[in-house]
Amino acid sequence: MSLDRLPTPCPVIDLDVLERNLARMALRAQAAGVALRPHAKTHKTLQIARRQLAEGAVGLTVAKTGEAEVYAAAGFDDLFIAYPVVGLGKPERLLAVARRARLAVGVDSVEGARALGAPFAAAGMHLRVRIEIDCGQHRTGVLPEDAAALARQVAPLPGLELEGVFTHGGHAYGCTTDAAREERAREEATRVAQAADAIRAAGLPCPVVSLGSTPTAATAMAGVGITEVRPGNYVFHDATQVALGSCGLEDCALTVLATIVSVPAADRAVLDAGSKALAADVRRPTPDGHGIVVGTSSRLTSLSEEHGVVSVAAGDSFHVGQRVRVIPNHACVVSNLHDVLYAVRRGEVEEGWPVAARGRVE
């Protein structure tokens, strides 16, 4: 059916742009000689994940146990949970996933690793683990110089198999210049490779050296010793990626279709898409509203649950009933807010893709 018949607000995927984004990253990974394991948390759909595998991805990255369960149940057989899985019942759930798929999990503590290994040892199985390295974001992970010490503690634990190291250059989202972003990418690659070298020097295996974030992927994957890259946002891109210089507006595949419900003043219009449809994330690296109204110079400057307030730029005008498309600040969150993503090509809706892993935060 025509795009004009979709109810608003709803997320819309431009298939031509999506396919271009998927192919571009796959070619970059191939040229760098690294495996592509994209992070599925951005889209959370089975359809896009299958397209990523068709483009050459070796498997998927996910964030939570619940996401791994969804993808394993759907037949995806090579999964990495890039998160320190800790909590009641979760090791047993991982064991069930590992019976269906090749599974690896991130760890950054011996306590967490020991808890994961116990049910696998009892079942006569091994869970592959990767040690998370803090390359500068200062979130989870150990410093490169501490990686070998943790590896020596983790490697002999029953039920575990040390597979390698991984990191995420999320601190690149604070960079305000291309030069700074590329420097962060080089640091990301250098630090995770240093950690891998230290583990090998300790006499332990470290075949996988994995990194990834969309702003750093192109530069970081070319680093010496890198074997795998895990970008996620690249499938859609968003207003933050545009601001960072990772892409142009023409590379943004995801928009939220919305309707103007009020024009109470010449300099203000209101959409039916608020924080429930767009998320409240501010744009990075510098705040500039809550989204870009496609084809205009206007920005969403405030959101409440059901209202998106547009500051109307000079030369722009809106009318009640007008349908517009908004490039969100953070595409990954938008996917998690909706039941279905509508796949559109040249104004025609081809499919509705259920967001299969929506809400799997556990």
Image (tube, rainbow, N blue to C red):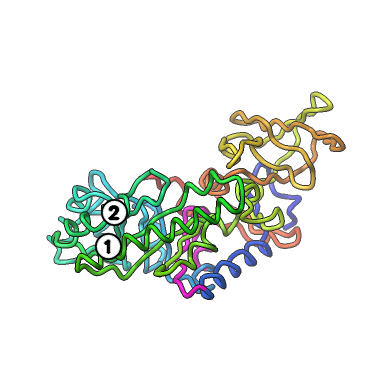
In the rendered structure, which segment of residues is drawn in magenta? 32-50
Query: Which element carries disc 1, helix, strand or loop?
Result: helix
Q: Is residue 206 above or below residue 337?
A: below
The answer to whether residue 121 is left or right of residue 68 is left
- Residue that label 1 marks: 198
Q: Are marks 1 and 2 in contact (CB under 8 Å)?
A: yes
x and y percentages locating residue 321 in the rendered image? 79, 37
Q: Based on the displayed image, in which of its 4 quarters is residue 208 positioned?
A: bottom left
Q: For mark 1, does the 10 Å Cα neighbourhood hold few (<14), some (14 to 19), or many (20 or more) residues? A: many
Q: Nearer the viewer, residue 62 or 45?
A: 62
Sequence-first disc among 1 and 2 = 2
Left or right: 199, with 191 as reference point:
left
SS of the residue under disc 2: helix
Which percent across, then down, holds residue 158?
A: 13, 61
Furthest-right residue in view?
315
Mark 2 is on which residue type?
Glu
Query: Closest to the observer: 330 or 306?
Result: 330
Q: CA distance from mark 1 to mark 2?
A: 8 Å
Say which quarter of the image contains residue 313.
top right
- Residue that mark 2 sits on: 145
Residue 321 or residue 284, whichever sits in front: 284
The answer to which of 315 and 14 lies nearer the viewer is: 315
Residue 10: in magenta span: no
Is residue 46 inside the magenta stretch?
yes
Q: Residue 75: which numbered mark, if any?
A: none
Q: Residues within 10 Å of mark 2 (few under 14, many from 20)?
A: some
Horizontal relation, residue 211 to residue 322: left or right = left
Task: List x then y, in percent, for residue 172.
Answer: 51, 49
